[in-house]
Structures are given as C-alpha cells and as structure tokens.
Amino acid sequence: MFFLVHLAAKIPDHEDVVRVLMGEHANMTVITNSDGQIPLLCAIQGGSTLSAQLLLEADPHSITTIDKNKSSVFHYCCQQKDNVLLANLLNRLKRLSSNQSVRIQVETKQKHIFLL
C-alpha cells in the first residue's frame, strides 16, 4: 500500500506538503506502508532531514518504531550516514527516557542492545 505522506516525506524540500498532510489527520505519523515504514522512516531513507525532524516533533514516540525488517530509525540513519540526525535522535531518546520509562530494544545480528 502506498500513501502520499510517505512519498512527500521521502522527497527533500517537501516539508510543507508533509505539514499539510499531518494537519489533515492526527494519526498521519503512524500510518505504515507495505514495507512497514512510517513517514519518519521514509524521510530518513530519502535524506529529507527537515521532514524527519518535523515528523519527530509531531510524534516523539515514533522514535521507537521498526519496519517489517526490524530496522529502527537508528538503522536508517546509519544506512544514510546521517550523523547529524542520528545525534538528534539520540538526544531526543535521552530526553524521552528521562521524562518517562521508555525502553527500546534494538536488535542486531549479534546481540540485543537496550537503550534506557
């Protein structure tokens, strides 16, 4: 299944389109496509850092989402070599964890890593 918000998120310089689509429906940030990706994952994959930040601000808990391949936002950042966004995500995770009890399990091929 394909959604316009996923496409808009994936294309750099389309933050305004993402913002309008998010205004249309409250749950726009959690809709998954056929690959199990939410718009945030598509934005990271497409190198659209501003859309990714916009989506993350709208739904801070989306940082815990994984796709059908069990790849997280951190995997996507590493694949795209986006160190700036990765640092931003880690800072947001730290703030989110300090505000409430959040435990994220990130699976790797060798072991499980728990971020608190």
Image (tube, grey):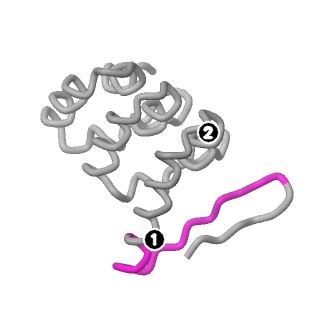
Residue at 43 percent across and 38 percent down: it is 38
Quadrant where the C terminus is found in the figure:
bottom right
Q: Label for residue 68?
A: 2
Residues at marks 1 and 2, CA–CA distance in whole angstroms: 25 Å
Residue at 49 percent across and 51 percent down: it is 65
Q: Is residue 97 magenta?
A: yes
Residue 2: image x %, image y %?
42, 19
Quadrant where the N terminus is found in the figure:
top left
Residue 12: image x %, image y %?
37, 21
Residue at 25 percent across and 49 percent down: it is 58
The residue wearing badge 1 is 94
Residue 78: image x %, image y %?
64, 42
Instruction: Report helix, strand or loop for mark 1.
Output: helix
Residue type beneath disc 1: Lys
Instruction: Report helix, strand or loop for mark 2.
Output: loop
**Residue sitting at the far right:** 110
Magenta part of the protein: which range? 96-109
Residue 54: image x %, image y %?
28, 42
